Amino acid sequence: MSNTSAQMRYKGSVAANPKWRGHLFFGTGRLLYAGPLGETRLHAHHSFQLVLSLGEPVALGDCHQRVKECEAAVIPPDVGHAVLGAASAAVLLHVSPDDLVGRSLRTLGLARDSVADWQRAGERLVALAPRALPRHWHEAEALARAMTLALQVDVADPRPAHPAVKRLLRLLPGMLADDVRLEVLAARVGLSASRLSHLFGAEVGLPLRPYILWLRLLRAAESLRHGSTLTDAAHVAGFTDSAHLSHVFRRMFGLSPSEVAGVVGWVLPPAE
């Protein structure tokens, strides 16, 4: 695809819904999609997005309608971008901007409005393109780890040690539909709100509020994988309604659950 024809996609001829027919590997703090890419309109999401093509380059555009055909790219959070040409096989790794990896990615100093800069940052990823798309959890985990390491983000998974933090981590999955205000949670584990907030971020690597949001998204994904309606998945995960779930999902990943439910293969972390 030429840059001229790709630029014309900004005129409104892009299909509304990309065909997400691959696999979504959904963990706390990150989501990896592996499969074909469809075209998207200009959009933004609140996560870093690492793009890695397994075949033909992916045509990416920025908010100034500049287009690059990229074998790999690193797109910063909350910036407008578009996929302007379908690709048969690619990996998209979404990383929370709030956890240790995301905070390290911020040090790359990526330009918010330059697809050329995103492409340059992605050059370190090109050699990692696997021969086949990951289909199992361990394959996706290994690839995600390799991609962040290639960007010189070597952050070990934190191992919470404080008894109150460890207790809260056990409690939270069963409290997603309940009152999870900081003050309430602090009282449950016998700490002040300020002490819990500090300890949680230091020991888990992700602040408490974003951590709970990722847990809720993960719970909703689990419900959708088992055939729940969008409304039921929203309620079980503690969202106000299906519109609230869709809004948060789109804000984080640039697409709504209804675009992928029943189409992609959801792969969730193995039970510990």
Image (cartoon, rainbow, N blue to C red):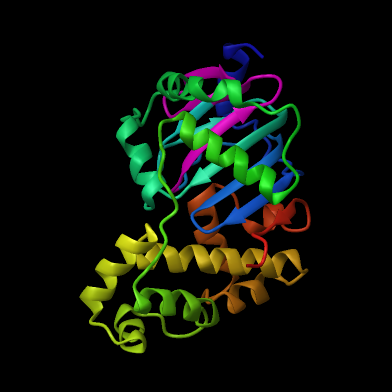
Q: Give residue 227's position: percent from left, percent from top.
A: 78, 69
Quick check: 52 above or below 28? above
User: Which residue is at a point 22% across and 74% down the rendered structure image?
Assistant: 195
User: Observer-nearest residue: 68 or 269?
Assistant: 269
Occupied quadrant, residue 134: top right
User: Which residue is at a point 53% across and 69% down the rendered structure image?
Assistant: 216
Magenta segment, which residues? 46-72
Q: Which quarter shows the N terminus?
A: top right
Quick check: 50 above or below 33? above
Is residue 48 shown in magenta? yes
> Is residue 221 in view from this perspective?
yes
User: Observer-nearest residue: 100 or 9?
Assistant: 100
User: Observer-nearest residue: 163 or 118?
Assistant: 163
Quick check: 45 above or below 218? above
Residue extending furthest toward the front: 161
User: Which residue is at a point 69% across and 19% down the rendered structure image?
Assistant: 56
Q: Give residue 25's position: percent from left, percent from top.
A: 65, 51
Give left or right: position of 177 versus 191: right
Occupied quadrant, residue 151: top left
Q: Give residue 190's position: percent from left, percent from top.
A: 30, 87
> Is residue 42 in view from this perspective?
no
Q: Which quarter shows the C terminus?
A: bottom right
Is residue 190 shown in magenta? no
User: Which residue is at a point 50% across and 62% down the rendered structure image?
Assistant: 214
Q: Give residue 131's position: percent from left, percent from top.
A: 74, 26
Occupied quadrant, residue 164: bottom left
**How many numbered badges does the structure rendering display?**
0
